[in-house]
Amino acid sequence: MGHTIRAYVNGRHVGYKFSQWGGNFTYEKQVSLKEGPNIITLLSATVGLANYGANFDKIKTGIAGGPVQLIGKNNVTIDLSTNLWSYKVGLNGEKRQLYNSQPRIGVSWRTNSSYPIGRPMTWYKAEFKAPSGADPVVVDLQGMGKGQAWVNGLSIGRYWTSWISDTNGCSGTCDYRGNYTTDKCNTNCGSPSQRWYHVPRSFLNNDKNTLVLFEEIGGNPKNISFQTVTAETICAQVEEGALLELSCQGGKTITQIQFASFGNPGGKCGSFKKGTWEATDGQSTVEAACIGKSSCGFTVTKEAFGVTFSLMKVDDGVARLAVQATC
């Protein structure tokens, strides 16, 4: 099987399993059966996008050929692969459009104060007011597991906040120089791969808004919150030999180097322009020194940027570094 399987016996959820790195696996689970007819339901799901490499159409996912077997005492085996199986795509909740702010007739939600926690295959619904202002809005899904989210009936994508990165591999220093590897400059070890999800302002109403979650593996919506994010731009321009310093406020980190040029750049913050010459390593050098940090600083030298020619040839004076970054 691959990528994920969830099993039910007579309507009762008995367990699930998912593959590691997209490989095949065998799912086995001890179950109790009743006398007479029993119904086995297998829900298969894929994770991520389909492979696009050679022979991608031959890569199997889901219950790829079976067999599906019942194994009893003394390893007595009954092969169910040739039994009459029915096949269905999607979930009943999707068909009934539970994610819609105005669902179909006959759909009702439980409104009591106690909601299920840690239960897989569960739909949650809540109302909220849009954060004031014009800053970008994100929803913090900390505490949830894996699923999909809708705001006012519009999908904001799938989430998987329970997928925690390895606790090892991060360091206090970052150096991108040399050959690139995926182990360079790792951050947020031991944290979810993603926790905040963007909600476009165009999705929101001025008054009442609806958030709907479909939780696949179990989570706790208690700590879900909506926040605004302010993108802060910082700039610096220093001559060769001086100290460049960049710093973000409020605990934010430098997430992007919008502009970096060591040579004779022109303009000012918000409208920097490259000059008639520049070092080829300007952007990458600043990114290696500053990305992911709340502050960074280094002395600007031609050696740091790989400049080997004489700066005396520069018509407009001493070389300088201009940087524009986002916190």
Image (tube, rainbow, N blue to C red):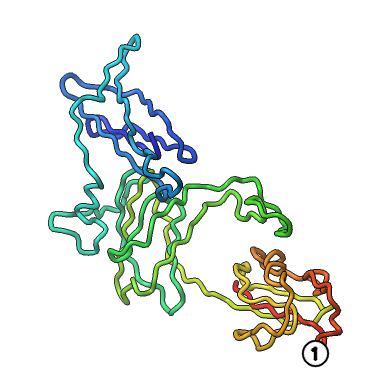
Work out which quarter of the rendered image holds the N terminus and state it: top left
Residue designated by label 1 = 315
Q: Residues within 10 Å of mark 1 (few under 14, many from 20)?
A: few
- Quarter of image, res 86: top left
Residue shown at 80%/69% (left/top)? 304
| Rendered location of residue 80, percent (x, y) | 25, 23
**Front position in the image: 67 or 27:** 67
Q: Is residue 313 above or below residue 107?
A: below
Please name whichever residue, 169 or 14, is drawn nearer the observer in this view of the structure. Answer: 169
- Could you tell me which secondary element the residue under label 1 belongs to? loop
Residue 192 vs residue 117, the one in the foreground: 192
Residue 95 pos. (x, y %)? 20, 52
Where does the image place residue 217, in percent across and percent down from the top left? 38, 43
Residue 131 appears at what percent x and percent y?
A: 41, 73
The answer to whether 320 appears left or right of 226 in the picture is right
The answer to whether 89 appears left or right of 29 in the picture is: left
Amino acid type, callout 1: Asp
At horizontal 30% and vertical 57% (from top left) the residue drawn is 125
Q: What's the residue at 63%, 75% (across, down)?
A: 325
124 sits left or right of 182 in the view = left
Residue at the far top: name it: 74
Q: Residue 118 falls in which quadrant of the image?
A: top left
**Vertical placement of 48 versus 6: above or below?**
below
Outermost residue, front direction? 54
Residue at 18%, 19% (x, y): give it: 35
Q: Is residue 259 above or below residue 140?
A: below
